[in-house]
Amino acid sequence: MATEHGDMQALREELHQAGLRATASRIAVLRLLRRAASPVSHAEVTEQLQGEGFDRATLYRNLFDLNKVGLARRADLGDHVWRFEAMQQGGHEREEHPHFVCNQCGHVECIDGVELVIPRGAKGPRAIRKKAVEIQLKGLCDRCAAA
Ligand SMILES: [Zn+2]
Ligand SMILES: [Zn+2]
């Protein structure tokens, strides 16, 4: 098992390799994204790192920096809030995947193993054939469905 120190060292090196300076806040943000089970917004990152002394604006820039160098993916799930998730999780590259959003409480979940199949000669914008689109599943989460 990796020690806390070894973990930090690995994140520092990854940031360097991506061309970013390994600041304390970038390390903290990348670590948070790697541990998160679903995409997180700037507000959630700010809340979860509260007490570590980073300011909101810095954390905001850090999220976009990580996105720019390919360490994080960015998604707008229809509510005009950018959410971020690590490109890698558990040491391997995370595949492109749809997200489930609860209509009622806004709960977001990553859904693996679902693929968009585009038939030959499909109509619509070129982005569809290039798969430069995001799939989003909407409905009620288990908790809201049970209520
Ligand atoms: Zn819900
Ligand atoms: Zn996801």
Image (spheres, helix red, strand yellow):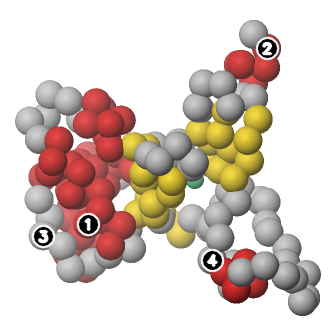
Q: Which amino acid does label 1 sit on?
A: Asp
How far apart are the two marked residues, 4 and 2, measured between alpha carbons? 35 Å
Front-lying residue, 126 or 134:
126
Residue drawn 77% across and 59% down?
113
How far apart are the two marked residues, 3 and 4, measured between alpha carbons? 30 Å
Dot 2: element: helix
How far apart are the two marked residues, 3 and 2, measured between alpha carbons? 47 Å
Query: Quick check: marks 3 and 1 in contact, CB under 8 Å?
Result: no
Name of the residue lying farthest toward the bottom? 121
Q: Is residue 73 above or below residue 18?
A: above
| Camera-nearest label, 3 or 2 | 2
User: Which residue has dot 1 on it?
Assistant: 65
Query: Can residue 87 be seen from the camera position used here?
Result: yes
Q: Where is residue 76 in the image (x, y as percent from the top left)?
A: 51, 54
- Label located before the other in sequence (3 or 4): 3
Q: Where is residue 54 in the image (x, y as percent from the top left)?
A: 11, 41
- Label located before the other in sequence (3 or 1): 3
Query: Quick check: marks 3 and 2 in contact, CB under 8 Å?
Result: no
Q: Indicate the quadrant containing the C terminus: top left, top right, bottom left or bottom right.
A: top right
Dot 1: element: helix
Front-lying residue, 62 or 52:
62
Residue drawn 57% across and 49% down?
77
Q: Position of residue 57 (x, y in %)?
A: 15, 48
| Camera-nearest label, 4 or 2 | 4
What is the crowding at mark 1: few (fewer than 14 residues within 10 Å), some, or many (at least 20)? Answer: some
User: Which residue has dot 2 on it?
Assistant: 146
User: Which residue has dot 4 on it?
Assistant: 132
Q: In which quarter of the image is residue 126?
A: bottom right
Q: Which amino acid does label 4 sit on?
A: Ala
